[in-house]
Image (tube, rainbow, N blue to C red):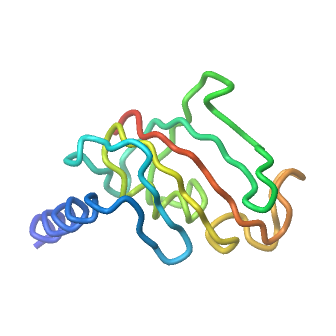
């Protein structure tokens, strides 16, 4: 049963890949550069990504792995990153570059983060899926 569900999820993701933009609850993914369209992350996979994060309201950049020259590595679907990443990145295929536009509840919410992201901020991340596992 798990194999059937996994295959159905992959098929649905592949169909979604034909859209340049789609709404995912509190996160909207817009494809900037198509990926391979076949290889998608699954919960628990270790991903390597580049990203640049900015505040939607004013465009202020608050963090960038690209500028540091060091990709970010984490496990997807395990709550290691904000909800907008956990859900939006799962819809990306290997090599894809996308823009994730998220509401505060899918970002840092009422608490904000690190003195650079204010409470209830809408966020935009440009992300690139470099590697799965």
Task: Write down the quadrant of residue 91 in the picture.
Answer: bottom left
Q: Is residue 2 left or right of residue 20?
A: left
Q: Quadrant of residue 118?
A: bottom right
- Is residue 106 toward the left or the right of residue 112 in the image? left
User: Where 96 sits versus 43, above or below?
Assistant: above
User: Residue reaching furthest top?
Assistant: 69
Does the image show residue 133? no
Q: In this view, which residue lies farthest toward the right?
A: 115
Residue at x 61%, y 66% (from the top left corner): 102
Residue lying farthest to the bottom in this orientation? 25
Question: Is residue 50 placed above or below 103 in the rendered structure?
Answer: above
Q: Name the spot of residue 123 as percent of width and height, x first.
A: 68, 60
Q: Position of residue 2 (x, y in %)?
A: 15, 68
Count of numbered circles in the view: 0
Quadrant of the image for the C terminus? top left
For the point 49% across and 37% down, which residue is it?
49
At 25% across and 59% down in the image, what residue appears? 18
Q: From the image, which quarter does the N terminus lie in?
A: bottom left
Q: Residue at x 61, y 21 (%)?
A: 69
Q: Which residue is at the front of the view, 93 or 113?
A: 93
Q: Is residue 118 left or right of residue 26?
A: right
Q: Is residue 38 visible?
A: yes
């Amino acid at each position: 049963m798990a194999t059937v569900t996994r295959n159905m999820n992959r098929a649905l993701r592949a169909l979604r890949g034909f859209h340049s933009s789609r709404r995912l609850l509190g996160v909207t993914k817009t494809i900037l550069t198509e990926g391979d369209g076949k290889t998608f992350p699954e919960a628990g996979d270790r991903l390597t990504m580049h990203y640049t994060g900015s505040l939607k309201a004013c465009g202020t950049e608050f963090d960038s792995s690209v500028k540091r020259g060091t990709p970010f590595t984490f496990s997807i679907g395990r709550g290691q990153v904000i909800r907008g990443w956990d859900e939006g990145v799962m819809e990306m295929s290997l090599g894809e570059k996308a823009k994730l536009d998220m509401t505060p509840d899918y970002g840092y919410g009422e608490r904000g983060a690190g003195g650079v992201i204010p409470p209830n901020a809408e966020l935009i991340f440009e992300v690139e899926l470099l590697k799965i596992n």
